[in-house]
Image (cartoon, helix red, strand yellow):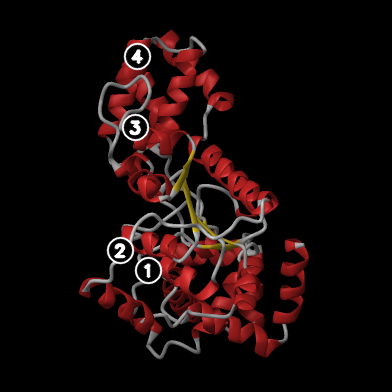
């Protein structure tokens, strides 16, 4: 095991894998870096994306523990940039423009303090539908306005006004579409049109660029066959750390072997196959009445028809007929299916292990493992 990278919507998995052969895991939540360092024994851990809304964020002390175990820890782009700026003095290696801004406490050209974690935050889709970003990060919008200013597309005062207006929005409402709408309201017609014409080719994906730079930095380090990291601090283990470790070990029901991790990483690239495997594995975990869960029939029907190409009414009726369903039966099926999809999106404890078990029992595991190991060579 050489590198473990926590990656989400910042960079497509396929693009990342082309840059660095590594074990790619979903955005890190609290405890994940500790688990990765303890169970997988990588030389390098790279933190790009992390979770924070629905669970505890990556804890500083677990990163310090990984460093104390000789693991080189890198951070960039998103949660990784935040933690790297906070822990740079302890040896965590930050990469990129966003990390530098957090470390220095200022975004170049902006007199305001740069320290808010909402600068890198985005809303993103569930993992089973690709996990893509549904909003744009403030740092990407800042970088784009900086580029527009440098290209003479907007005036300095207009760039400052638009930046301030975007900053006032909740992070989930920030987007390039919102930027265009604000320009239409706040700039004169000619300036707004000039920016609109420039934006399609002028956008700066700062988070993506920083993530790429970090993966290249990790690849460069691994090419040198590095010695274990030597920490300059003593890692103490007070009672609250001992409780944290105990909690991680007691709820670590997804601790699976490295081969299974590689297989699931490979499977995750195929959204349909991932979703099908997750549904099959879910039966191993859950015993509940899915009808009792909240579901949205219209959304479920749209997804059902899209996945099966049943947009024509006659095609849908034919499918119902050969499957012995009337409209009430189809609605019940979709309600249950949508309820299960919502559970899958949350990846309940044990889901990954159950998926690995399902792949082994159905005979699909070996082929995926061969493909994953072939890509790593």
- Of 317 and 181, the residue lying toward us: 181
Which mark is on residue 56?
2
Q: Which residue is mark 1?
A: 31
CA neighbours of label 2 inside 10 A, class few (<14), some (14 to 19), many (20+): few
Residue 129, position as x, y percentages in the image: 53, 61
Q: Do the numbered discs 2 and 1 sit on residues whose CB atoms are within 8 Å?
A: yes
Which mark is on residue 158?
4
| First of labels 3, 4 by sequence position | 3
| First of labels 2, 1 by sequence position | 1
Secondary structure under badge 1? loop
- Of 86 and 332, the residue lying toward us: 86
Q: In whole angstroms, how far apart are the C-alphas of marks 2 and 1?
A: 9 Å
Q: Which residue is mark 3?
A: 104
Residue 334, position as x, y percentages in the image: 48, 74
Where the N terminus falls, by quadrant? bottom right
Residue 61, position as x, y percentages in the image: 32, 61
Which quadrant of the figure has residue 170?
Answer: top left
Q: In whole angstroms, how far apart are the C-alphas of marks 2 and 3?
A: 26 Å
Residue 84 versus residue 311 in the image, above or below: above
């Amino acid at each position: 095991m050489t590198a473990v990278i926590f990656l989400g919507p910042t960079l497509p998995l396929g693009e990342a894998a082309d840059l660095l052969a590594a074990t790619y895991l979903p955005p890190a939540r609290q405890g994940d870096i500790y688990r990765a360092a303890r169970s997988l024994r990588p030389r390098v851990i790279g933190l790009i994306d992390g979770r924070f809304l629905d669970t505890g964020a990556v804890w500083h002390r677990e990163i310090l523990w990984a460093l104390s175990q000789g693991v080189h820890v890198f951070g960039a782009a998103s949660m990784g940039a935040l933690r790297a700026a906070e822990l740079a003095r302890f040896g965590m290696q930050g990469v990129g423009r966003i990390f530098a801004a957090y470390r220095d406490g200022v975004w170049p050209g902006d007199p305001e303090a740069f320290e808010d974690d909402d600068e890198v935050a985005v809303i993103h889709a569930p993992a089973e539908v690709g996990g893509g970003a549904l909003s744009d990060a403030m740092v990407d919008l800042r970088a784009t306005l900086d580029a527009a200013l440098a290209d003479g597309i907007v005036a300095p005062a207009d760039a400052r006004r638009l930046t301030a207006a975007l900053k006032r929005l909740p992070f989930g409402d920030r987007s390039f579409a919102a930027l265009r709408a604000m320009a239409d309201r706040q700039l004169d017609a000619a300036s707004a049109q000039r920016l609109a014409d420039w934006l399609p080719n002028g956008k700066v994906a700062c988070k993506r660029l920083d993530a790429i730079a970090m993966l290249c930095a990790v690849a460069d380090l691994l090419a040198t066959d590095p010695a274990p990291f030597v920490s300059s601090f003593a890692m103490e283990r007070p009672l609250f750390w001992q409780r944290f470790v105990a909690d991680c070990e007691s709820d670590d029901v997804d601790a699976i072997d490295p081969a299974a991790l590689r297989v699931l990483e490979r499977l995750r690239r195929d959204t349909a196959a991932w979703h099908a495997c997750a549904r099959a594995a879910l039966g191993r975990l859950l015993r509940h009445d899915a009808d009792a869960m909240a579901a949205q029939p219209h959304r479920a029907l749209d997804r059902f028809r899209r996945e099966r190409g049943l947009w024509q009414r006659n095609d849908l009726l034919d499918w119902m007929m050969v499957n012995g369903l009337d409209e009430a039966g189809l609605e019940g099926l979709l309600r249950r299916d949508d309820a299960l999809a919502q559970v899958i999106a949350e990846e309940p404890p044990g889901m990954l292990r159950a998926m690995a078990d399902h792949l082994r029992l159905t005979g699909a595991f070996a082929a995926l493992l061969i493909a994953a190991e072939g890509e790593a060579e």
